[in-house]
């Protein structure tokens, strides 16, 4: 009998708690994220109880996101239970204000959601559309003529790499992706000689990762950092994302890779490079752009 009474009281508390209401917005733009209540699997906001000893009636409640981004969750026991709020679309993550403490205000919440797919990947983000980037070239290495200085270059360069321009962003997903991948300029150069002067490797005009040559033995390493005011990074125990706006770096062609990667992404950021500042489309460092000798 006592157990039955406790359950009934818990149910009454849940029913007497005010509903949870608010709006789901895009964290990057502030615009409401439109739901479709008529969809087979509409976007929902879920409130999941945090802690132990929570009754079944109070464990979870949810509400459907409407076309204007608003939602209402009935049946949560907010007067005596803490909740964690989440969205049914696993590519949307409420990073900053997902916790709802006991007795906290439940009306007019603003849930700012970030697009955060799972895994370790890089995307071009245009509005709400995500396009997965794929690596487009092997990483070739040579040594600056007569030295041990390593020079990296792409094995091939696509005719038109993915373009990140206008309001587009690069989206880095995953802890290793966000911390280890670097965006490095691909710098065009005239013909160069590499390796041992007695048996030099000759490479016709090509582009190099973060190296600006003045001669075969004179060079400058370039490693521009994105404008921090145009980079948004968020992380918790389960998510890590970084958004880089298209104007966070000077316009040009870039390689995206880790220090010891064997493959690289190639993207144009801000604008396509001038025709005379890059190798011929679909050129390759193994001879299609000119004799490349024994370049590795």
Image: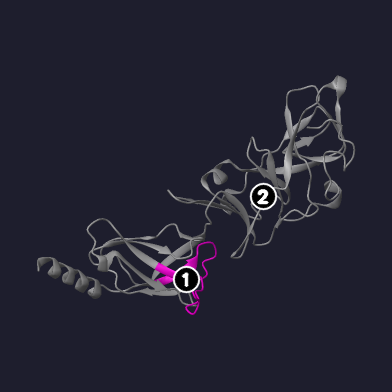
On residue 286, which mark appears? none
Depth order, front residue of 141/234: 141
Residue 233 forms part of the magenta stretch: no
Which mark lies nearer to you, 2 or 1? 1
Q: Is residue 250 above or below residue 98?
A: above
Report the magenta residues as a range.
Answer: 22-45
The residue at the far left in this view is 1
Is 131 situated left or right of 275 in this image?
left
Coordinates of residue 64 in the picture (x, y in percent): 42, 74
The number of callouts visible is: 2
Compared to residue 66, the image places residue 223 above or below, namely above
Return the x and y of residue 133 as percentages of the image width and height. 66, 53
Quarter occupied by residue 139: top right
Circle 1 Cα neighbour tier, 10 Å, few/some/many (<14 / 14–19 / ≥20)? many
Q: Residue furthest front?
A: 1
Give the labeled residue for mark 1: 43
């Amino acid at each position: 009998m006592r157990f039955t009474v406790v359950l009934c009281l818990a149910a009454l508390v849940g029913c007497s708690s005010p509903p949870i209401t608010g709006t789901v917005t895009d964290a990057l733009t502030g615009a409401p994220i439109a739901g479709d209540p008529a969809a087979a699997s509409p976007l929902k906001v879920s409130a999941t109880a945090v802690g132990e000893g929570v009754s079944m009636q109070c464990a979870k409640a949810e509400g459907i996101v409407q076309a204007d981004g608003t939602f209402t969750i009935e049946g949560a026991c907010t007067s005596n239970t803490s909740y964690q709020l989440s969205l049914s679309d696993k590519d949307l993550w409420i990073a900053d204000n997902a916790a709802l403490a006991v007795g906290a205000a439940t009306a007019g919440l603003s849930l700012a959601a970030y697009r955060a797919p799972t895994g370790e990947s890089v995307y071009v983000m245009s509005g709400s559309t995500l396009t997965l980037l794929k690596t487009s070239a092997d990483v070739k290495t040579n040594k600056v003529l007569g030295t041990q200085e390593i020079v990296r270059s792409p094995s091939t360069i696509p005719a038109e790499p993915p373009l990140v321009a206008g309001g587009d962003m690069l989206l880095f997903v995953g802890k290793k992706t966000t911390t280890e991948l670097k965006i490095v300029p691909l710098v065009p150069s005239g013909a160069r000689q590499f390796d041992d002067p007695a048996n030099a490797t000759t490479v016709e005009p090509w582009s190099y990762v973060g190296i600006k040559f003045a001669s075969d033995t004179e060079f400058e390493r370039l490693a521009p950092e994105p404008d921090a005011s145009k980079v948004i990074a968020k992380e918790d125990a389960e998510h890590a994302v970084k958004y880089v706006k298209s104007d966070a770096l000077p316009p040009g062609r870039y390689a995206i890779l880790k220090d010891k990667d064997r493959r690289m992404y190639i993207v144009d950021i801000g604008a396509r490079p001038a025709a005379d500042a890059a190798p011929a489309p679909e050129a390759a460092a193994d001879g299609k752009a000119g004799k490349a000798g024994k370049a590795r």
